[in-house]
Image (tube, helix red, strand yellow):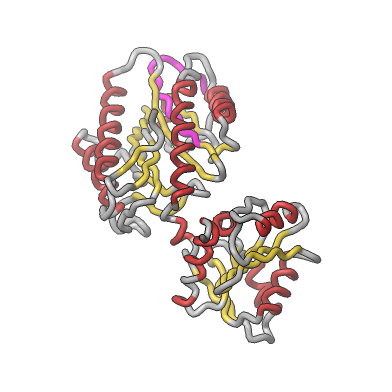
Amino acid sequence: MPNKLTNRQLAVSGKLDDQSLDALLITHLPNISYLTGLRASAGVALLGQKELHLVIDSRYLSVASSLVETESGPADLTIVPVNQSYDESVGNLIAEMGYSRIGVEAEWMSLRQWNWLARRFEREVQTFVPVEGIIEGSRVIKDEDEIACFRSAGRLIASAIEPIIELVRKGRKELEIAGGIDSVLAWKGFEDRAFSTMVASGPNSALPHARPSERVVSDGDLVLLDFGGVYNGYCVDVSRTVCIGPVEEQSRRFYSAVLEAQESAIAEVGPGVVASKVDDVARAVLANHGFPEAFGHGTGHGLGLEIHEAPRIGRRGQPGCDVVLEPGMVFTVEPGLYVPGVGGVRLEDDVLVTEEGGEVLTRP
């Protein structure tokens, strides 16, 4: 029976005919990891209709070779050691395989790589075709193994929320709190941060992507925390907002509005729902609370081997936001409210689309 990596390989190679391609040259490392199971800082893959070649240098040769020897590795995988350089090794492989029409990942191939291929094959029969989304289109629907990984990662980060909130105390600097959050994530078993941890207090919390600073947390501050971890290669992402000392009425209004917006948006999640409808619901709630212009970013983003993937949960008509939700999609739901000079609130959880609706992964 084919394993998960072989099934992924077959699904992607089956799309080559749709664009009249003999092969796909893969340079985006998360896509290589998705197809081969190898997590590395360098590498190139060449996928044909029935074969998969992985070009890898000596640092990862032993690990890559073990993929061929195990039943859990992808079928028909051939390891190609780098000799002089990646460019030369890839060029020699393309020539050897005799492919004539080869897709390249337009979003991820550098101009230098494109120019090198053009020069290398200027007198040959090979044609290189920029393509987009061939592998990402498969990655958007998580398989059983990926869903199990997300559920484990969700439970793990949910267990970290309480000790992280306990770090937020009057008199502590944002940078100090951020360092503590990173330590909690490591203690809980995450192999890395999914992104740079955010701690923004007082007026800084009105900046959706603020960086931790030397600012000292004071009474009355709203403190926005945004943190995420990598678990078995997959990213989870959570935001919470806490208030220091006595909670002012304005802060209660902010928090209540965002909490209702998030709960309403999550309730909208389900198969067959257009992604932008989830965003519509969150914005409508905030508008009803008197904050129609205080939410500028999208309601969510997909999660996977990268912290930002498809689908996008944003405004109707924006690129990628009008896709129909399907079981197996995983994304954040993170409405926010930001008032410059005053403060802001964001609440974020990760949601899996199931046959029944939306399963929140990141709550105890």
Is any atom of residue 297 visible in this view? no
Q: Residue at x 37, y 59 (%)?
A: 319
Specify the segment rendered in magenta.
215-228
- Name the residue: 44% across, 22% down: 162
Q: Position of residue 310 (x, y in %)?
A: 42, 54
**Measuring 66% from the left and 63% from the top, which residue is drawn there?**
54
The reply, left or right, for residue 317 in relation to residue 21 is: left
Nearest the viewer among 148 and 58 is 148
> Residue extending furthest front?
1
Does the magenta portion include 94? no
130 or 98: which is nearer to us? Answer: 98
Q: Is residue 280 left or right of residue 218?
A: left
State whether residue 262 is above or below residue 317: above
Q: Nearer the viewer, residue 277 or 74?
A: 74
Residue found farthest to the left: 288
Image-quadrant location for residue 251 = top left
Instruction: Please report the residue visible at 19 percent of the width from the left and 37 percent of the height from the top.
Output: 288
Image-based side of 142 in relation to 83, left or right: left
Residue 224 covered by magenta stretch: yes
Q: Position of residue 216 (x, y in %)?
A: 51, 19
- Nearer the observer, 25 or 334: 25
Residue 24 seen in this snapshot: yes
Q: Picture coordinates of residue 56 (x, y %)?
A: 71, 60
Q: Residue furthest right?
A: 84
